[in-house]
Amino acid sequence: MRQHKDCNFSYAGLKTPVRLAIESRNLCTDDIPISSATEEDRQLRANIAASFQRIAVLHLEDRCQRAVEWALKMRPSIKNFVVSGGVASNQYVRTRLNHIAEKNGLQLVSPPPSLCTDNGVMIAWTGIEHFVPGRFEDPPPADEPDDMQYDLRPRWPLGEEYSEGRSVSRSLKTARIHPSLTSMTQSSLHN
């Protein structure tokens, strides 16, 4: 996806080369646990894992750099670059994204790693971030029937969505992705 100059990213194109690298070296990862593998096999596994991590993080760095440039163009007063969630528990990722922050004159802000791996904490924090500025709906009345329909949000962004940070719509065949449940629901409500 490097050819797309937006902030979208996918690791789909990375998984197949990794699988092929594993298969071409006859690594039987399902049959032989790492504790029983030969030294050569362990080294191959470590090299493939390190290569995967490096390429995945390079891809993340590329997209974050674009996002930072775009954000600074819109709001030059931005001072912080926030990284949270499971990705922020990885020290290598934090280090590399700190380089992006420093290069752009920003301060990297992340929760402690112990809070980054617990989705419950991250979901609760997202709720707080929406609650404080008043972005919430009152709970349904206690006597509301159980068969009422609710707005399900598989993604709940903290900020506004801007089209510049996302790619121009491509066909699903070209993009090789499934449509967003949110966008499908929204478009069906407007038709």
Image (cartoon, grey):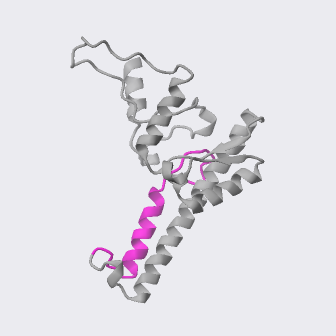
* Residue 191 at least partly seen: no
Confirm whether the magenta stretch covers residue 12.
Answer: yes
Q: Is residue 5 above or below residue 95?
A: above
Q: Is residue 1 above or below residue 124?
A: below
Q: Position of residue 119 (x, y in %)?
A: 42, 44
- Is 39 left, or right, of 158 in this rendering? left
- Is 144 left, or right, of 66 in this rendering? left
Q: Is residue 182 above or below residue 37?
A: above
- In the image, the segment drawn in magenta is 1-30
Residue drawn where x is 42% and y is 65% of the image: 16
Q: Position of residue 13 (x, y in %)?
A: 47, 59
- The quadrant in which the C terminus is found is top left
- Is 169 left, or right, of 62 in this rendering? left
Residue drawn where x is 47% and y is 77% of the image: 46
Q: Quadrant of residue 151?
A: top left
- Is 43 left, or right, of 37 in this rendering? right
* Residue 185 at least partly seen: yes
Residue drawn where x is 41% and y is 24% of the image: 187
Q: Position of residue 100 (x, y in %)?
A: 70, 53
Residue drawn where x is 58% and y is 57% of the image: 59
Q: Quadrant of residue 182?
A: top left
Confirm whether the magenta stretch covers residue 96.
Answer: no
Q: Position of residue 56 (x, y in %)?
A: 53, 61
